[in-house]
Image (cartoon, coloured by chain):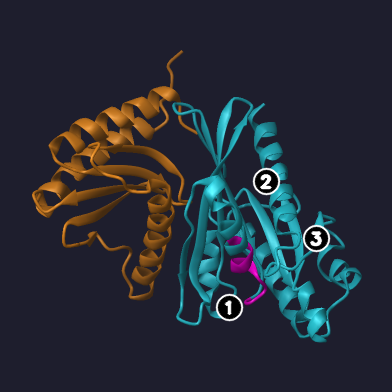
Chain colours: A cyan, B orange
Amino acid sequence: MAFLNHKTNEIQLKIVYYGPGRSGKTTNLRYIYENFSERLNSKMITINTEGERTIFFDYFPFDIGEIAGYKVKVQLYTVPGQMKYKSTRRLVLNGIDGVVFVANAVKSERRRNILSLRDLQKNLRHYQKNIFQIPFVFQYNKLDLTKKGIPLLSPALLERDLNRQLMRPAYVASAIEGRNVAATLKTIISMTSQSVTANLN
Amino acid sequence: MFSQRQLTDIEIVLKSALVDKGVSCVLLIDMAGNLIANISNGKSETDVYSLAALAAGNYGAVNAIASLVGEEDFSLQFHKGKIMNIHFKSLPNGYLIISLFQNDLSLGYLRLLVSEVSKEIQFILTPKVSNG
């Protein structure tokens, strides 16, 4: 949960990008880092394989100014999406304040999206967190693949599969092109900050 | 959540018991990777937020390995570099003291210092019951 330091007047928020393997979680962070790191004055850490598959997590911290008199430090993490890293995913979720669920809009990935969301719900329960209460944004990624003629799931179908009950904000995106990456991030930061300041009050 | 008083006391203890005795930089973190306290000798330029995140993940992973091999945990977690070394000491309730130190400080002496400090930190972190 958000760590509040009364001495330095700082809040540390942990936002995790979750989703099945190769859905674009690292690409999201990489886009943010490559386009905003100078302004944010921060570095990104990636722990991955030679094939650039995340093996542990990616990490990117930055300051976003003050809220309610506290300096807010946002810490973005990604989890490894491959099935074999389920223990690592659970580790990374420890202390989570907000989630971006990056779903892969490619048709063949439909089942993996659903399984990954169930996996997230189970892992959140491990930390006594309720998926219906935590700040949460969906991103339906890989919109750019329509140009290559690859069949994609429609946003309506993705909404029905993943967001029918949760009813959270959702963005159709192309992380590799940067489309709606910043919008997704702004929304989750806003939701997470509001949640934390509400608890402060 | 810690009070300002607790955080100040923690910093005082870490500075006097570790940094003033030769430790380059010491962090107190939680297992979520949050940085609770950070004291250095002023010569260290480490990105402490990234270090906290990585250390928490690393410690969690090593504990998982310990479970796999039938151990409750590993009593010594330490990495040796050419110039800078790093030592991890876990506290109850999910906190970790991370000490960065150079070769002029022996590991044995550091472990002694950290062992003493961890008792003091635990005392500061333990909620006190008021008698009123």
Q: Look at the numbered disc 1 and give the secondary structure of its residue.
A: loop
Are dots 3 and 1 on a single chain? Answer: yes
The local crowd at label 1, few if under 14, some if 14 to 19, many if 20 or more residues have their Cα within 10 Å, is some
Q: Horizontally, is B120 left or right of B112 in the view?
A: right
| Marks 2/3: CA–CA distance | 15 Å
Q: Amino acid at mark 2?
A: Ile
Q: Look at the numbered disc 3 and give the secondary structure of its residue.
A: strand
Q: Horizontally, is A38 left or right of A140 in the view?
A: left
Judge by depth and name the residue closer to the eye, B76 or A153. Answer: A153
Dot 1 corresponds to which residue? Answer: A82
Label whose residue precedes the other's in the sequence (2 or 1): 1
3 and 1 marks in contact (CB < 8 Å): no
Q: Amino acid at mark 1?
A: Gln
Dot 2 corresponds to which residue? Answer: A189
* Chain identity of mark 3: A
Q: Which residues are magenta?
A: A21-29
